[in-house]
Image (spheres, rainbow, N blue to C red):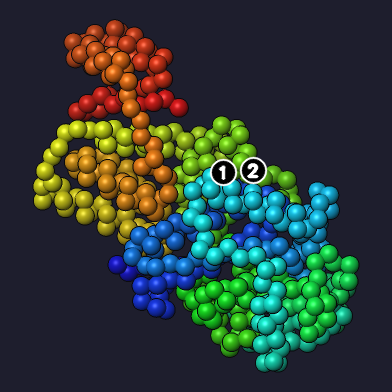
Amino acid sequence: MDIYFSNTLTGKKDLFTPIKEGEVGIYSCGPTVYWNQHIGHMYAYTQWDVLVRFLRSAGFEVKWVMNITDVGHMTSDQDEGEDKMEKGARREGIDVWQLAQKYIDQFKDSLFLLNITFPDVLCRATDHIADQIELIKKIEARGFTYKTKTGLVFDTSKFPDYARFASLNLESQKAGARVEVDPEKKNPWDFLLWVTGKPNHLMQWDSPWGRGFPGWHIECTAMSVKYLGENFDIHTGGKEHIPVHHTNEIAQAYGAFGRQTANYWLHNDWLTLKGGEKMSKSKGNFITVQELKEKGYEPLALRYLFLNSHYKKGIEFSWEGLEAASNALLRLRNQLNSIKNDTRRESLSSEKLSKLDYFRDSFMGALADDLNTPLALSFVWEALKSNIPSSDKYDLIIFFDEVLGLKLSEFSFDIPEEVKKLAEIRASLRKEGKFEEADKIRQEIESKGFGVSDLPDRTEVYPIK
């Protein structure tokens, strides 16, 4: 099966060829833990979870590495402003270490609630200061740095392709540059590898360039290389990372190793609110998975909603959309439970075996085409409506769910005998044309917490949310 991904590095959809046959290394830019991770962030991590699950389902051995930024990320995403961790600690009246742990815990809980596979390696920047210093030494030894009053700076003029990855217009950046930030910089887009010009910063370490702390970008290069090697398969992140963070990562790798680290760079679009407004902490318009749960929504319904969008297109979040996703997930569980409890046994004819192969191939083929989850999900519903024997159909959907991550096998239920008998009476009344009496039986069934659905060959009974 050929797999294709939209690769920002080449600007096109590329055939995926792993560096080592049967193995895939993936690095995902993780959270900066100065505040809660909202559902916009979790949209991205859900998409990359599907990527990991799909590749594993396709037979690859996957190593997934994700970082946690707990130092050095400025409020501007560049070298200006104040450290986000320090700003967050001041906001909450706690120290930066307490702040980091508080929001690492919230992030891990969000992963759990959305059934996102826990990364094989979840690494903190502050646990890898020595690795970052060693990487900076390599970059310095190859002549890619210079010093200013603010610290050790990466000289982008030494990397001719600096603007290529994000198609940057550097001349326009120069025209609008804020020279007061660091007038000693050769170019406004040169960036700090190690910061020494902030003596009051709360998190500092000794280094060959003086006491200070790492710039934001160096941690991802240092930790991805540590755990995946100098050349690995896939690097993921949000589209906001393209013009600054990932551009600088590529420059750092060139400075240290003479080439980029990742062969495929995948970027998700955003979750937005109505009218395309971006959900962000700075605007105060964000919603967490925990808040959705408090409002009575099941987190897996949010995951189902996410699966209905392609990672390259993003999604517009609405409460109506979440409600629809909740209802669809409930129907999916109910139908799956119905076929699981179907005691009829049929042999798998060649025609039905062919259909089974068709659905499996179509589902995996949709995901192989740049992770098309909406199309893959449509094959789940199509398979449910098919005439494949129930036991085989159930196994097929559970196979799909290894990638979708909706925990479908965990949601089974028993129908009380009393409710089953009422459903049988109702079905008999309907056959006799006594629809008014049948409707009264339906109301009685609903009063006991169950609904009924009339299918061509049977009546389905299911619990009501």
| Residue 244 relative to residue 261: left or right | right
Q: Which residue is mark 2?
A: 287
Label annotation for residue 317: 1
Given residues 460 and 176, the one toward you in this image is 460
Q: Give the SS element for disc 1.
A: loop
Q: Give the SS element for disc 2.
A: loop
Residue at 54 percent of width and 56 percent of height:
45
Residue 464, quarter of the rendered image: top left
Residue at 36 percent of width and 76 percent of height:
21
Look at the image and tell me whether residue 142 can be seen. Answer: yes
Give the position of the N terminus as an image quadrant: bottom left
Residue 24, quarter of the rendered image: bottom left
Given residues 381 and 230, the one toward you in this image is 230
Percent of width and height locating residue 407: 41, 44
Look at the image and tell me whether residue 305 can be seen. Answer: no
Given residues 102 and 397, the one toward you in this image is 102
Q: Nearer the viewer, mark 2 or mark 1?
A: 2
Residue at 40 percent of width and 72 percent of height:
23
